[in-house]
Image: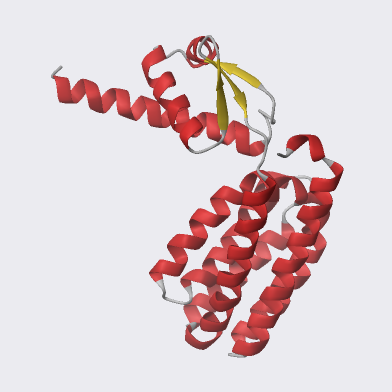
Amino acid sequence: MGTLEVLAETTSKAENVYNALLEKIVDGDYPPGYSLSIREISQQIEVSRTPVKEAFSRLVYDGYVEPLPNRSFIVARISTTEVLELLEVREALERSAAFYAAQRRTDTDIAELQRISEYHRNIPADEIAEVALWDKKFHLAIARATYNQQMCGILEKVFEKLTRITLPITRDRVADSVRQHKAILDAIRAHNADEARRLMSDHDRDVLASVKAYQYQNIHLFK
Protein backbone atom coordinates (compact mmCIF):
# COMPACT_ATOMS: atom_id res chain seq x y z
CA MET A 1 0.00 0.00 0.00
CA GLY A 2 1.45 3.37 -1.02
CA THR A 3 1.80 6.50 1.11
CA LEU A 4 -1.33 8.14 -0.30
CA GLU A 5 -3.41 5.02 0.30
CA VAL A 6 -2.22 4.81 3.91
CA LEU A 7 -2.98 8.50 4.43
CA ALA A 8 -6.48 8.12 2.95
CA GLU A 9 -7.19 5.11 5.18
CA THR A 10 -6.01 6.95 8.29
CA THR A 11 -8.05 10.03 7.38
CA SER A 12 -11.15 7.92 6.86
CA LYS A 13 -10.69 6.23 10.24
CA ALA A 14 -10.18 9.60 11.94
CA GLU A 15 -13.39 10.89 10.35
CA ASN A 16 -15.30 7.84 11.57
CA VAL A 17 -13.91 8.20 15.10
CA TYR A 18 -14.74 11.91 15.10
CA ASN A 19 -18.33 11.27 14.02
CA ALA A 20 -18.78 8.50 16.59
CA LEU A 21 -17.47 10.65 19.45
CA LEU A 22 -19.41 13.70 18.31
CA GLU A 23 -22.64 11.68 18.27
CA LYS A 24 -22.00 10.54 21.84
CA ILE A 25 -21.34 14.12 22.95
CA VAL A 26 -24.33 15.61 21.14
CA ASP A 27 -26.71 12.89 22.36
CA GLY A 28 -25.57 13.43 25.95
CA ASP A 29 -24.00 9.98 26.38
CA TYR A 30 -20.78 11.89 27.08
CA PRO A 31 -22.06 14.90 29.09
CA PRO A 32 -20.04 18.02 29.94
CA GLY A 33 -17.27 17.06 32.36
CA TYR A 34 -17.02 13.48 31.10
CA SER A 35 -13.43 12.24 30.90
CA LEU A 36 -12.06 10.57 27.76
CA SER A 37 -8.64 9.33 26.72
CA ILE A 38 -6.97 8.35 23.48
CA ARG A 39 -5.96 4.95 24.89
CA GLU A 40 -9.47 4.20 26.20
CA ILE A 41 -11.23 5.10 22.95
CA SER A 42 -8.61 3.30 20.87
CA GLN A 43 -9.23 0.10 22.83
CA GLN A 44 -13.01 0.44 22.79
CA ILE A 45 -13.36 0.81 19.04
CA GLU A 46 -10.30 -1.26 18.17
CA VAL A 47 -8.39 1.20 16.03
CA SER A 48 -4.86 2.53 16.36
CA ARG A 49 -4.21 5.64 18.41
CA THR A 50 -3.27 7.81 15.40
CA PRO A 51 -6.80 8.33 13.99
CA VAL A 52 -8.17 8.68 17.52
CA LYS A 53 -5.63 11.41 18.24
CA GLU A 54 -6.61 13.18 15.01
CA ALA A 55 -10.29 12.93 15.92
CA PHE A 56 -9.66 14.46 19.34
CA SER A 57 -7.62 17.28 17.80
CA ARG A 58 -10.61 18.14 15.62
CA LEU A 59 -13.01 17.93 18.56
CA VAL A 60 -10.77 20.34 20.49
CA TYR A 61 -10.71 22.72 17.52
CA ASP A 62 -14.51 22.55 17.21
CA GLY A 63 -14.92 23.26 20.93
CA TYR A 64 -16.50 19.97 21.97
CA VAL A 65 -13.67 18.76 24.23
CA GLU A 66 -10.82 20.33 26.15
CA PRO A 67 -7.33 18.77 26.47
CA LEU A 68 -5.94 17.57 29.78
CA PRO A 69 -2.51 16.13 30.66
CA ASN A 70 -1.57 12.54 29.75
CA ARG A 71 -3.46 12.47 26.45
CA SER A 72 -6.82 12.73 28.16
CA PHE A 73 -9.71 15.07 27.44
CA ILE A 74 -12.85 16.36 29.09
CA VAL A 75 -16.14 17.09 27.35
CA ALA A 76 -16.46 20.86 27.31
CA ARG A 77 -19.30 22.65 28.99
CA ILE A 78 -21.72 24.36 26.64
CA SER A 79 -21.02 28.01 25.92
CA THR A 80 -24.00 30.11 26.98
CA THR A 81 -22.85 32.99 24.78
CA GLU A 82 -22.47 30.78 21.71
CA VAL A 83 -25.89 29.19 22.21
CA LEU A 84 -27.64 32.55 22.49
CA GLU A 85 -25.79 33.89 19.46
CA LEU A 86 -26.69 30.83 17.40
CA LEU A 87 -30.34 31.09 18.42
CA GLU A 88 -30.38 34.74 17.34
CA VAL A 89 -28.86 33.73 13.98
CA ARG A 90 -31.41 30.93 13.67
CA GLU A 91 -34.35 33.26 14.23
CA ALA A 92 -33.03 35.88 11.82
CA LEU A 93 -32.50 33.34 9.06
CA GLU A 94 -35.59 31.21 9.67
CA ARG A 95 -38.04 34.08 9.67
CA SER A 96 -36.65 35.04 6.27
CA ALA A 97 -36.71 31.41 5.14
CA ALA A 98 -40.39 31.09 6.04
CA PHE A 99 -41.15 34.34 4.21
CA TYR A 100 -39.40 33.32 0.99
CA ALA A 101 -40.63 29.72 1.17
CA ALA A 102 -44.21 30.99 1.24
CA GLN A 103 -43.51 32.95 -1.93
CA ARG A 104 -41.48 30.35 -3.82
CA ARG A 105 -42.68 26.93 -2.65
CA THR A 106 -43.92 24.41 -5.16
CA ASP A 107 -46.58 21.75 -4.70
CA THR A 108 -43.75 19.25 -4.31
CA ASP A 109 -42.31 21.32 -1.45
CA ILE A 110 -45.68 21.38 0.30
CA ALA A 111 -46.07 17.63 -0.12
CA GLU A 112 -42.63 17.08 1.43
CA LEU A 113 -43.37 19.43 4.34
CA GLN A 114 -46.69 17.69 4.90
CA ARG A 115 -45.01 14.27 4.88
CA ILE A 116 -42.36 15.37 7.39
CA SER A 117 -44.93 17.10 9.58
CA GLU A 118 -47.18 14.03 9.75
CA TYR A 119 -44.30 11.68 10.49
CA HIS A 120 -42.98 14.04 13.17
CA ARG A 121 -46.41 14.27 14.79
CA ASN A 122 -46.76 10.48 15.06
CA ILE A 123 -43.37 9.69 16.62
CA PRO A 124 -43.77 8.50 20.25
CA ALA A 125 -42.82 11.35 22.58
CA ASP A 126 -40.25 9.23 24.42
CA GLU A 127 -38.20 8.71 21.22
CA ILE A 128 -36.44 12.01 21.76
CA ALA A 129 -33.63 11.61 19.25
CA GLU A 130 -36.09 10.67 16.50
CA VAL A 131 -38.42 13.54 17.38
CA ALA A 132 -35.53 16.01 17.33
CA LEU A 133 -34.28 14.65 14.00
CA TRP A 134 -37.64 15.11 12.26
CA ASP A 135 -38.12 18.49 13.86
CA LYS A 136 -34.87 19.55 12.20
CA LYS A 137 -35.95 17.95 8.91
CA PHE A 138 -39.07 20.15 8.92
CA HIS A 139 -37.08 23.34 9.38
CA LEU A 140 -34.50 22.45 6.76
CA ALA A 141 -37.25 21.51 4.29
CA ILE A 142 -38.59 25.05 4.67
CA ALA A 143 -35.10 26.39 3.99
CA ARG A 144 -34.85 24.26 0.85
CA ALA A 145 -38.20 25.65 -0.33
CA THR A 146 -36.58 29.10 -0.51
CA TYR A 147 -34.26 27.84 -3.27
CA ASN A 148 -31.51 29.85 -1.62
CA GLN A 149 -28.51 27.53 -1.30
CA GLN A 150 -26.55 29.92 0.91
CA MET A 151 -29.38 30.11 3.42
CA CYS A 152 -29.75 26.32 3.43
CA GLY A 153 -26.05 25.76 4.03
CA ILE A 154 -25.82 28.23 6.91
CA LEU A 155 -28.95 26.90 8.61
CA GLU A 156 -27.69 23.32 8.41
CA LYS A 157 -24.53 24.36 10.26
CA VAL A 158 -26.51 26.34 12.84
CA PHE A 159 -28.79 23.39 13.57
CA GLU A 160 -25.80 21.06 13.89
CA LYS A 161 -24.11 23.35 16.41
CA LEU A 162 -27.33 23.72 18.42
CA THR A 163 -27.99 19.98 18.77
CA ARG A 164 -26.39 19.73 22.22
CA ILE A 165 -28.94 22.18 23.59
CA THR A 166 -32.02 21.53 21.45
CA LEU A 167 -31.99 17.75 21.98
CA PRO A 168 -32.54 17.86 25.77
CA ILE A 169 -35.39 20.41 25.53
CA THR A 170 -37.24 18.38 22.89
CA ARG A 171 -39.21 16.22 25.34
CA ASP A 172 -41.08 19.17 26.87
CA ARG A 173 -41.64 20.86 23.52
CA VAL A 174 -43.20 18.08 21.44
CA ALA A 175 -46.83 19.23 21.62
CA ASP A 176 -45.96 22.91 21.14
CA SER A 177 -43.65 22.18 18.21
CA VAL A 178 -46.25 20.05 16.42
CA ARG A 179 -48.87 22.79 16.82
CA GLN A 180 -46.51 25.57 15.75
CA HIS A 181 -45.21 23.62 12.77
CA LYS A 182 -48.76 23.06 11.53
CA ALA A 183 -49.51 26.78 11.68
CA ILE A 184 -46.29 27.63 9.83
CA LEU A 185 -47.01 25.02 7.17
CA ASP A 186 -50.55 26.33 6.69
CA ALA A 187 -49.22 29.85 6.13
CA ILE A 188 -46.60 28.65 3.65
CA ARG A 189 -49.21 26.57 1.83
CA ALA A 190 -51.45 29.67 1.57
CA HIS A 191 -48.59 31.81 0.20
CA ASN A 192 -49.03 34.07 3.24
CA ALA A 193 -45.43 35.19 3.53
CA ASP A 194 -45.92 37.79 6.28
CA GLU A 195 -47.83 35.34 8.47
CA ALA A 196 -45.28 32.59 7.87
CA ARG A 197 -42.50 34.95 8.92
CA ARG A 198 -44.38 36.01 12.05
CA LEU A 199 -45.20 32.45 13.08
CA MET A 200 -41.63 31.27 12.56
CA SER A 201 -40.28 34.15 14.60
CA ASP A 202 -42.71 33.32 17.42
CA HIS A 203 -41.71 29.65 17.22
CA ASP A 204 -37.99 30.38 17.45
CA ARG A 205 -38.50 32.79 20.35
CA ASP A 206 -40.45 30.06 22.12
CA VAL A 207 -37.50 27.73 21.58
CA LEU A 208 -35.22 30.41 23.05
CA ALA A 209 -37.42 30.62 26.16
CA SER A 210 -37.21 26.84 26.59
CA VAL A 211 -33.43 26.93 26.20
CA LYS A 212 -33.08 29.65 28.82
CA ALA A 213 -35.22 27.63 31.24
CA TYR A 214 -33.05 24.56 30.61
CA GLN A 215 -29.90 26.58 31.20
CA TYR A 216 -31.25 27.88 34.50
CA GLN A 217 -32.12 24.35 35.63
CA ASN A 218 -28.80 22.86 34.49
CA ILE A 219 -26.34 25.65 35.11
CA HIS A 220 -23.52 23.14 35.80
CA LEU A 221 -23.54 22.10 32.13
CA PHE A 222 -22.78 25.62 30.88
CA LYS A 223 -19.94 28.09 30.95
Q: Position of residue 123 (x, y in %)?
A: 72, 54
Q: Is residue 67 left or right of residue 4?
A: right
Q: Residue at x 42, y 19 (%)?
A: 53
Q: Residue at x 39, y 24 (%)?
A: 54
12 to 186, vertically: above or below: above
What residue sits 23% from the left and 24% below the top?
7
* Residue 23 locus on image (x, y percent): 57, 35
Q: Quick one: which residue is furthest to the right in this view?
A: 217
What colour scheme governs how the chains and residues are painted in the rendered image of this protein? secondary structure
Q: Position of residue 75 (x, y in %)?
A: 62, 28
Q: Is residue 29 left or right of residue 22?
A: right
Determine if residue 116 is in view.
Answer: no
Along the line of sight, the residue nearer the viewer: 218 or 13: 218
Q: Is residue 189 visible?
A: yes
Q: Tell me residue 2's x, y (percent).
A: 13, 19
Among the 4 quarters of the image, the one containing residue 192:
bottom right
Q: Nearer the viewer, residue 76 or 7?
A: 76
Asked if 117 appears above or below 198 in the picture, the reply is above
Q: How many marks?
A: 0
Compared across the picture, whether 172 is left or right of 139 comes to right
Residue 47 as seen in the image, left or right of residue 4: right
- Residue 171 drawn above or below residue 92: above
Q: What residue sits 75% from the left and 36% below the top?
A: 221
